[in-house]
Image: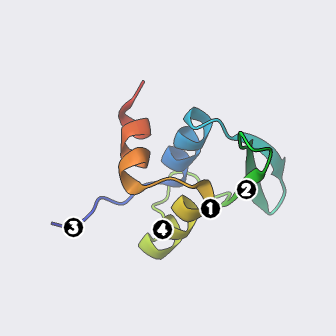
Amino acid sequence: MSEMAHTYDQFRQVLRKAGFELRRSGKHEVWRRIEPDGSKRRVIISHQHGKDIPAWLFAKMLRQAGLSRDEFEKLLRDP
């Protein structure tokens, strides 16, 4: 079974639900969340809207966000 591709807009939606805030928007967007221990987690996203994220980049963005694919899918489905 092939995995469904996700768009940059969907990833932004999930980041908001996971508590990330857009901190800077230059050549790339920088999303940040402060963790309970005070550390900062950053995710860098391209300004491409509505386009599919390549699988290798999607995996890298998930690692930056500290999310599993299952957590991402759950947050995407939740209203």
Q: Earlier in the sequence, mark 2 or mark 1?
A: 2
Residue at x-position 84% and y-position 49%: 24
Q: Which dot, 3 or 1, sits closer to the camera?
A: 1
Look at label 3 and name its amino acid: Ser
Look at label 4 and name its amino acid: Ala
In terms of depth relative to the viewer, which is nearer, 56 or 50? 56
Number of other residues with Cα within 10 Å of mark 3, as a class: few under 14, some 14 to 19, many 20 or more: few
Tell me: residue 58, above or below residue 71: below
Instruction: Residue under label 3, please give it.
Output: 2
Q: Earlier in the sequence, mark 2 or mark 4?
A: 2
Q: Which mark is residue 42?
A: 2
- The x and y percentages for residue 16 are 61, 36
Q: Which mark is residue 64?
A: 1
In terms of depth relative to the viewer, which is nearer, 66 or 72? 66
Q: In the structure shown, which secondary structural element does the residue marked by tag 2 occupy?
A: strand
Q: Earlier in the sequence, mark 3 or mark 1?
A: 3
* Whole-number angstrom distance, CA of label 1 to CA of label 4: 9 Å
On screen, residue 19 versus residue 69, left or right, reads: right
Q: Earlier in the sequence, mark 4 or mark 3?
A: 3
Look at label 1 and name its amino acid: Gln
